[in-house]
Amino acid sequence: MGDKISVDPNRLEDLANEFVVHLTNIEEEYKSLHMELVNLISSAPAEYRHCFYQVGDPWGTGNRLTDLLSEMEIDLRMTANKFAEADNLVGKLYKLYEKYGALTSMSALVSKQLTFYGLGFTQFAKNADGLFTYNHMGALQKLSDTVDNSKFRTVARGILSPSFLMKKYRNTPFDDLVHRKVAKYLPDDVVKFTDSSKAMLKGIQYRELDSTKFKSFVQTGTKFAKTNAVSAVLVTGAVEMGGMGLKISENYAKYGNNTDILKRENAKAVGNAVNKTVAVSGGSIAGAVVGGALLSFLGPIGTVAGATVGSFLGGVVGEQAAKLTAGIAEKAAIVFKDPIHDGLEMIRGGLEKAGAVVEGVNKGINSVNDQIKSTIEDPIGKMQEIGKGISKAKDTANSLFDGAKDYLEDKLSFL
């Protein structure tokens, strides 16, 4: 028996498509049988209607059968997608790039935060009660007072971040907003969460945890998490909505002539986007709270750094969790396949144009994958092939040069 199994993802997808065709036929058949039975019973004389009481229920039986087939189709297509992903070398490289980019962004954010604190723009200190307080650098405080007391107060806040024009920041000093811009969190929220986290961790360590400490941790942690929640949901949602749009466009290119398959695949795309947004955002938010709490023993600066790292790691965990719930999300979204389809049909023209572009890109990726695989399988032969191509190009160039030289010599022979 060979040590490799060859699977054609396209054949698996064809099987999934056949499932959808049969699924549609079965749905139409059991609904038709149900209506015929209803009409038969209603048209029978009243004294004979009891004869139909033991007749089976086509609607219920058909529903159970189509649910089973629908789940099988989802599993089959997901398997095909996984084989296709495993065979996509360019896709794997791009995913590595995504992770690398995320790590770079996280490192840049932590560096910016630590630089801000290292230069002393905001300092934290303990008071007589052992609780943290904060104050900003004198120059930053003066700038804040100048801005807050000037007629350009609103403009300055808007330039710092459009979100700072929201009502909840109306009474927040400008220097606190600067801290929020760089460190992601308002300094007061960081201080309160740090104090409550340290109190809870000490309570656990010395077995002195009570409801008051736990309640304080939950209250301050909730407020601390809200800041991370907004950015996590917006960023994750934007990325997933973009991916959903590309997937739907691709579906129009592949299944535009098969409405039944198109409806299901577009509904799945919507379900997966929502599922991943919820999972990744939830993981990121929880990770920020946990990471901030765990490093709170280092003080507020540790809380901020821990929250940043925890947010990233939580997002990674959420991404893996989303894979486990993908099938459930797809099944739930298929229930709404008709309204989703009706909404997308209003912009069908744009989706079809985008789909043509996506299809072209996919063909290019497949071509590159084929080139990479052939090189891996026969690197020497591939180098020889490249060498022959270069040699041929060189011969062609020399031929053109010689021809141009002869032409010029002929034309300029009178000189």
Image (tube, rainbow, N blue to C red):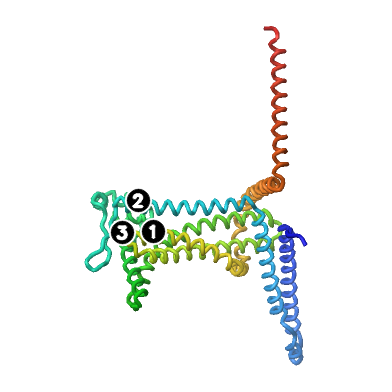
Direction bottom: furthest residue = 47
Query: Is 49 in front, or is 77?
Result: 77
Q: Residues within 10 Å of mark 2 (few under 14, many from 20)?
A: few
Q: Position of residue 286 (x, y in %)?
A: 44, 66
For the point 71% across and 71% down, the residue is 27
Q: Is residue 21 left or right of residue 227?
A: right
Evaluate if marks 1 and 2 touch, with contact meaning CB atoms under 8 Å apart.
no
Whether residue 214 is visible here, answered yes or no, is no
For the point 73% across and 75% down, the residue is 30
Query: Is 357 in front, or is 226?
Result: 226
Residue 54 in which image quadrant: bottom right
Q: Position of residue 234 (x, y in %)?
A: 47, 58
* N-terminal label among 1 and 3: 3
* N-terminal label among 1 and 2: 2
**Gap between marks 3 and 2 measured at Cα:** 27 Å
Direction top: furthest residue = 415
Q: Position of residue 307 (x, y in %)?
A: 40, 61
Query: Which numbered circle lies on residue 115?
Result: 2
Whether residue 320 is visible here, answered yes or no, is yes
In the image, which is nearer the foreground, mark 1 or mark 3? Answer: 1
Q: Residues within 10 Å of mark 1 (few under 14, many from 20)?
A: many
Query: Is 109 in front, or is 164?
Result: 109
Query: Which numbered circle lies on residue 305?
Result: 1
Indicate the secondary structure of the residue bearing disc 3.
loop
Q: Is residue 156 above or below residue 328?
A: above
Q: Quadrant of the C terminus?
A: top right
Q: Is residue 22 above or below residue 103?
A: below
Residue carrying label 3: 170
| Residue type, mark 3 in image | Arg
Indicate the secondary structure of the residue bearing disc 1.
helix
